[in-house]
Image (cartoon, rainbow, N blue to C red):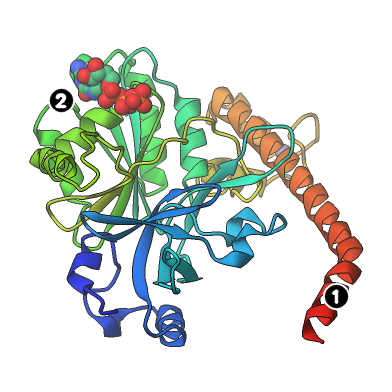
């Protein structure tokens, strides 16, 4: 199978030339000659849909190990992962390996049993979209920033600047906090053509971006503006395809005109920490104050020499921000506890099933 690197490049392939690839990628590629490279665009129970070119997708089987019920979700490929495919006789293509992830955005899956759910892997730019209308919520922004902290670069887009309803001083405080964390931000009207040029400065060849944010903040508007004529072209292609489907099939990986690509996945809605997040980047100010407390395990309640309480009393720390910090910290700790319990249960389950597996193995080996 020959590899069309120019086509891969439009899907976010990180290197313009093979010698610019990360060393661990080169190693995996060398281990699997005669495979095709694809990028996961959909993950299903029974397999994956993988993009093998900018307008080409294939349904493929998952690597057999990933189908085992005890395979941790983070070891299976998710949307955005790069995988190597092989066509085995009479079967549809199968994933035989995954290139090491550079980063992954995840959340705690909904439901009683604690599980991590991977949202998207190998993301260069996350646009966190927040509307400046009455729905504006600084605490929700902090939560998003914490959850997408694993991405290489975060840019906050404040939409609905054309009908801003957020008080100027509230907005100014948020801006200061972003600037102190080195996060770029822009206030814009998503329906205006300038929105595209604002986003385009972050979207170069080989870049993969996602848009996250609550419902109604303008993600679709921005996505459509970025796609422009591209989307119409895509639909034309689709309407002529062999299955004759006139669908506007939801595309999860959208090549943009400038060589960047956009991953568009549903599921950034329920925002629950997984336990792996760090509050330090989003709450640098709070954590550096806490480091000045007299006691290392200060809970900032009634302890003497508490730098947090002193800052609150002096009006230098926003009480709502501190309250959100406590809340998120509590959620992360609970998620960590649940994760620990789950790992413990998995370890025990392994011990119990081991003799059976061994027995089976020796039976087949004989
Ligand atoms: N005036 C103004 N309206 C906007 C702006 N951004 C979005 N809107 C409008 O807000 C509404 C919701 O925008 P969408 O782009 O659908 O929001 P979304 O984030 O994709 O919402 P979901 O699909 O529910 O996640 C639409 O009617 C948009 O036209 C903006 O910057 N200014
Ligand atoms: Zn303290």
Judged from the image, the secondary structure of the residue bearing numbered disc 1 is helix
Distance from label 1 to label 2 (Cα)? 62 Å
User: Circles 1 and 2: CB distance less than 8 Å?
Assistant: no
Judged from the image, the secondary structure of the residue bearing numbered disc 2 is loop
Q: Position of residue 315 (x, y in %)?
A: 54, 25
Q: What residue does disc 2 label?
A: 191
Q: In this view, does 365 lie above or below 151?
A: below
Quarter location, residue 141: top left
Q: Position of residue 338 (x, y in %)?
A: 77, 43
Q: Which residue is drawn at 29% across and 31% down?
A: 219
Q: Is residue 357 above or below residue 226?
A: below
Q: Which residue is drawn at 55% across and 29% down?
A: 321
Q: Can residue 160 be seen in this view?
A: no
Q: Can residue 86 be seen in this view?
A: yes
- The answer to whether residue 29 is left or right of residue 146 is left
- The answer to whether residue 205 is left or right of residue 282 is left
Residue count near mark 1 (Cα–Cα under 10 Å), binned few <14, some 14–19, many ≥20: few
For this rendering, which residue is in front, 294 or 32?
32
* Circle 1 or circle 2, nearest the eye: 1
Q: Which residue is drawn at 91% across and 70% down?
A: 355
Q: Which residue is drawn at 78% across and 55% down?
A: 343
Instruction: Tell me the quadrant of the picture where the N terminus can be found.
Output: bottom left
> Which of the two discs, 1 and 2, labels the residue nearer the N terminus?
2
Q: Position of residue 87 (x, y in %)?
A: 40, 72
Q: Which mark is residue 358?
A: 1
Q: Position of residue 278 (x, y in %)?
A: 59, 49
Q: Is residue 204 above or below residue 253?
A: below
* Ligand 1 neighbours mark 2 (CB distance < 8 Å): yes
């Amino acid at each position: 199978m020959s590899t069309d690197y120019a086509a891969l490049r439009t899907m976010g392939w990180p290197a313009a030339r093979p010698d610019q690839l990360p060393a661990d990628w080169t190693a995996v590629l060398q281990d699997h000659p005669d495979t095709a490279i694809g990028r996961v665009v959909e993950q299903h129970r029974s397999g994956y849909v993988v993009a093998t070119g900018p307008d080409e997708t294939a349904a493929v089987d998952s690597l057999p190990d990933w189908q085992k019920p005890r395979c941790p979700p983070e070891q299976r490929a998710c949307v955005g992962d790069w995988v190597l495919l092989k066509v085995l006789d009479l079967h549809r293509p199968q994933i035989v390996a995954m290139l090491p992830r550079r980063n992954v955005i995840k959340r705690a899956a909904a439901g009683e049993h604690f599980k991590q759910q991977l949202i998207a892997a190998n993301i260069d730019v996350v646009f966190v979209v927040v509307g400046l209308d009455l729905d504006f919520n600084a605490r929700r922004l902090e939560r998003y920033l914490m959850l997408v902290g694993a991405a290489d670069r975060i840019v906050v887009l404040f939409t609905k600047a054309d009908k801003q309803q957020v008080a100027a001083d509230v907005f100014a405080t948020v801006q200061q906090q972003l600037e102190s964390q080195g996060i770029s931000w822009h206030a814009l009207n998503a329906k205006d053509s300038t929105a595209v040029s604002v986003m385009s400065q972050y979207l170069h060849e080989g870049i993969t971006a996602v848009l996250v944010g609550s419902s109604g903040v303008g993600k679709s508007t921005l996505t459509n503006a970025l796609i422009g004529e591209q989307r119409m072209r895509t639909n034309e292609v689709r309407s002529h395809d062999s299955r004759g489907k006139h669908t506007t099939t939801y595309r999860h990986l959208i090549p943009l005109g400038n060589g960047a690509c956009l991953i568009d996945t549903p599921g950034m809605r329920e925002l629950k920490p997984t336990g792996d997040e760090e509050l330090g980047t989003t709450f640098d100010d709070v954590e550096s104050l806490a480091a000045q407390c007299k006691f290392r395990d200060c809970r900032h309640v009634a302890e003497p020499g508490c730098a947090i309480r002193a800052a609150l009393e002096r009006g230098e720390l926003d009480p709502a921000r501190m309250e959100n910090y406590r809340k998120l910290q509590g959620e992360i700790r609970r998620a960590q506890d649940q994760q620990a319990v789950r790992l413990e249960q998995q370890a025990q389950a392994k011990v119990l099933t081991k003799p059976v597996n061994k027995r089976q193995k020796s039976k087949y080996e004989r």
